[in-house]
Image (cartoon, rainbow, N blue to C red):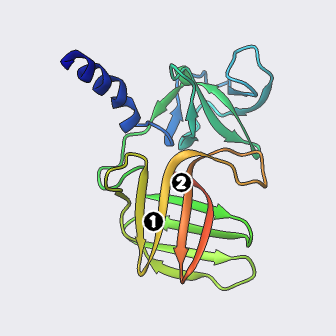
Amino acid sequence: MRWLVALLLVLAAPLAADPVPALFDVTGVAADDVLNVREEPSAGSEVIGALAPDAVGVEVVELTVGADWGRVNVNEMSGWVSMRYMQQQPDAAEVWMTPRFACYGTEPFWSLTVEQGVAAQFRIMGEAEQHLPAGLLQLGAGVIDRFALPLGHNVAILRQMQCHDGMSDRAFGLDVGLMLNGSLYAGCCTLLAD
């Protein structure tokens, strides 16, 4: 029975440390070449875009089983790059994920740009921007994939999962529910490089 419990703990460990979304830098690509972004996670798949050989702060939102390929956004669509040519940026010591990220939603069109521990700006299309204090993302109690972000008297709940905005062919690695001034907004978030 002990060996079964130990096996389950080992198998469950990767779920608690989902490595994406995260920011990566392109590495190992010749200065006169590019890293191809492909339609499917396969070297024979159609090329839909490219990353510069010195690209930094590229958000990877999904990994294939085995982590050989990562989904990125390029040209307002998502595609796949070989992770052999990607190096994860070091984690920020003071925050989970990255210090800055942005969230977007529709019905109505809105955006939220956050610098953790500093401030956030919320905007609904056609209305004045609202400035809010921003706390730090905090892991939810008893869950491994949900984080709460205090925004003054408001809160955003972020969840690590595939998210699509319904308006573009981009892919996101974070889903958000934002309770702001008594209204609930839903959308997707993307990490921002410094």
Q: Residue at x 55, y 45 (%)?
A: 161
Left or right of 165: which side holds 134? Answer: left
Residue 68 at x, y percent in the picture:
55, 20
Q: Residue at x 64, y 76 (%)?
A: 123
In the rendered view, tell whether residue 153 sits above or below residue 159: below
- Depth check: 188 or 12 in front? 12
| Quadrant of the rendered image containing residue 8 | top left
Type of amino acid at the residue the image marks with label 1? Glu
Q: Earlier in the sequence, mark 1 or mark 2?
A: 1
Q: Residue at x 30, y 55 (%)?
A: 94
Which structural element holds mark 2?
A: strand
Image mark for residue 29: none
Residue 105 at x, y percent in the picture:
67, 64
Q: Residue at x 71, y 41 (%)?
A: 74
Image mark for residue 192: 2
Q: CA distance from mark 1 to mark 2?
A: 10 Å
Residue assigned mark 1: 115
Which structural element holds mark 1?
A: strand
| Quadrant of the rendered image containing residue 127 | bottom right
- Depth check: 148 or 78 in front? 148
Left or right of 159: which side holds 38? Answer: right
Residue 98 seen from this side: no
Residue 9 at x, y percent in the picture:
28, 27
Residue 150 seen from this side: yes
Farthest left residue in view? 2
Farthest front residue in view? 1
In the rendered view, tell whether residue 128 sits above or below residue 192: below
